[in-house]
Image: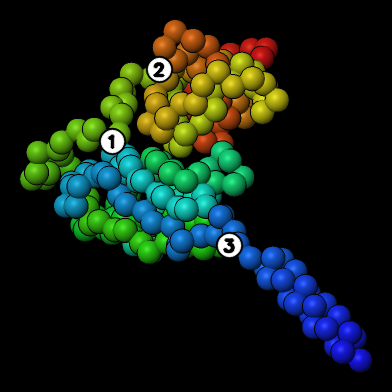
Amino acid sequence: MLVAAIYLSLAACNLQDRTIESTGGEPTDRPSGPPTIQIASPNDGAEYVIGEEILVSVQAVDSIGVTRVQLFVDNQIVRTVSSESLQGDLELPAILNYVPQRADLGAITLRALAYRGAVVSEPDEITVVVRESPAQVIATPIQQSHVPFIPNDGVCRALVNVGLNFRTGPSTGFQIITVLSSGTLAPVTGRNSEHSWWRLNVDNRAGWVSGDFTTEYGDCSRAPVVAG
């Protein structure tokens, strides 16, 4: 009987040890909280004119990965930009654009949110003023370092909205040349037949980017269809 009792006691101890081992250790990929987001530009109180594009530069951060960011104007979603990675990015700088209309005259609120899947950040927001004509603008506009200057010369260009893979051909199966940072503005030298990929010239290198992550400026209707 004594031997049996000792055996049962040892078995219980061994079972307890195995249970502790199986549950020990916290996963390293647990989120530390929701994402965060900050509007880098424009400045609060900046002034614009009807039809003048507002480029909103944001910086979103998350311990797991920011999957998308959204821009709201007076509580209406006007722009969504997603990460090219399905897992998201630990840091996601992005540029979101909005063109104010007559209904926006006066002060409007620009609000930015970041998402990790369905988990949403606290908003960051600023107020800008929309004027009817340039003569009504009181403050001297300042070119923000976070956003590019976009020439109004009709040349077809693509603005990269988020960090974007620059590839040797028009699909995700092609080799990555480099990663273009958000805010990169480059001439479009061609497109694929589906109008879904653009061939760009960046630092004298030709490569391709997905049109889902860019904004086009100028006359892009004449961009030639070229082989990847």
Q: Residue at x 56, y 55 (%)?
A: 28
Report the mark closest to the observer, 2 or 1.
1
In the rendered image, the residue lying farthest to the top is 204
Kind of residue indicated by mark 1: His
- Looking at the picture, tell me which residue is in the foreground, 195 or 26: 26
For disc 1, the marked residue is 146
- Determine crowd level at label 2: few under 14, some 14-19, many 20+ residues with C-alpha closer than 10 A: some
Is residue 11 found left or right of 31 in the rendered image?
Answer: right
- Residue 38 visible, this orientation: yes
Of helix, strand and loop, which one carries label 1?
Answer: loop
Kind of residue indicated by mark 2: Val
Quadrant of the rendered image containing residue 27:
bottom right
Q: Residue at x 46, y 61 (%)?
A: 32
Q: Residue at x 68, y 71 (%)?
A: 20
- Looking at the picture, tell me which residue is in the foreground, 33 or 126: 33
First in sequence, mark 3 or 2: give its number.
3
In three-dimensional space, the C-alpha distance between marks 2 and 1, rounded to whole angstroms, equals 22 Å
Report the mark closest to the observer, 3 or 2.
3
First in sequence, mark 3 or 1: give its number.
3
Residue 22 position within the rendered picture, expressed as x and y whole percent measured from the top left: 72, 66
- Looking at the picture, tell me which residue is in the foreground, 123 or 7: 7
For disc 2, the marked residue is 155
Quarter of the image with the N terminus in it: bottom right
- Determine crowd level at label 3: few under 14, some 14-19, many 20+ residues with C-alpha closer than 10 A: few
Report the mark closest to the observer, 3 or 1.
3
